[in-house]
Image: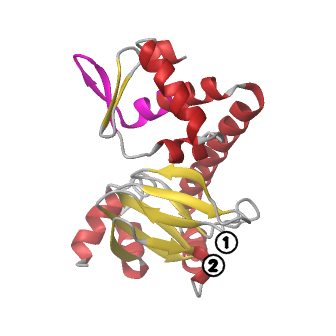
Amino acid sequence: MQREIKYWYLRNYDLFSNLTKEQINDLCGISKFVRMKKGHTIYFASDEVKRVYFLINGKIKISEMDQSGNEMIKDILLTGDLFGEISFNMLTLSHEYAEILSSEVILCTFTMDEFEELMHKHPMLCLNFTKKIGDKLRKLEHRHANLVFKDVKERLKDFLKMWAINEGKDTPEGVLIKNYLTHNEIASLISSSRQTVTTIINELKEEGALSYSRSQIVIPNIAVLS
C-alpha cells in the first residue's frame, strides 16, 4: 500500500488523529496494512509474534471455541476498534480468533514490540491507547452487569438498543439496522439459546417494539427497549 494512503488511513483513525504529521509518518514506516474478505479468520495463537490490530474499516467477530467445539462469540467490533494479542497484564486473547463479517475489512497491524516502542516515543499515543483499553473494559463491565442483574429478555432489549445506537440509521419508520447476525449469534452474545432469542424476538414483534427480518431490523422507538 502506498505511503500516502497509509497516512490518510492513520490520520483519520481516532486513536492517531491528534498525533503530529511527523508522528504519523513514523507509524507509516513500520505499520502493515492488510485487506481481508468476508469469512477470513485470524487465529491469534497461530501468529508467530504477538500483534495488535486496528480496524480501519469493516466489521469483525471475536470468538472462542468451548471444550465441546461450540463457538462462543465474545464481541462484534466495528470501524475504529482494536483487537489482537493485547496483554499488558490486562487482556489475554491467545485462545480467541477474529472472523471477518463485512464484505471486506482493512486492518492496520503492528507487532506488540513495535507498538510498545511507539508508545514510549509518543506519550500522546500511549494516552490514547489507554483510553481505548478503558473503553473496552467498560464495555465488558456493562455486559457482566447485564448477566448478573438482567434476565434474558432485558439483555436482548439492551443489546438491540446498543446495536441501534452504534449502527442504526434514522428513517421515517424508526431506527433501521442492517441485520448481519443470526439468532444463534445474538444468543451467544447475550449468553442465551437460539430458541429463547427467537421466542423473545417474536414477543417484541407482537408488542410492536420492532419489525425483524433476515436483512433488517426496524425499531420505531428505542426508548421502548430501555
Residue 55 in which image quadrant: bottom left
Tell me where residue 97 appears, x and y as whole percent. 56, 68
Q: Quadrant of the C terminus?
A: top right
Relative height, residue 178 to residue 106 (above, below): above
The local crowd at label 2, few if under 14, some if 14 to 19, many if 20 or more residues have their Cα within 10 Å, is some
Tell me where residue 147 appears, x and y as whole percent. 72, 34
Badge 1 amino acid: Ser
Relative height, residue 113 to residue 172 (above, below): below
Q: Within the magenta stretch, is there residue 6?
A: no
> 45 and 79: which one is in front?
45
Stretch of the chain drawn in magenta: 161-178
**Sequence-wise first label, 1 or 2:** 2
Label 2 element class: helix
Q: Name the residue rendered at 48%, 19% in the picture.
A: 204
> 205 and 164: which one is in front?
205
Q: Is residue 104 left or right of residue 62?
A: left
Q: Which residue is mark 1?
A: 94
Which label is found at residue 45? 2
Q: Distance from label 1 to label 2 (Cα)?
A: 5 Å
Badge 2 amino acid: Ala
The local crowd at label 1, few if under 14, some if 14 to 19, many if 20 or more residues have their Cα within 10 Å, is some
Tell me where residue 223 appears, x and y as whole percent. 47, 13
Colour option used: secondary structure
Q: Is residue 217 left or right of residue 125?
A: left
Q: Name the residue rendered at 56%, 50% in the picture.
A: 75
- Quick check: marks 1 and 2 in contact, CB under 8 Å? yes
State the residue lying farthest toward the bottom: 48
> 5 and 96: which one is in front?
96
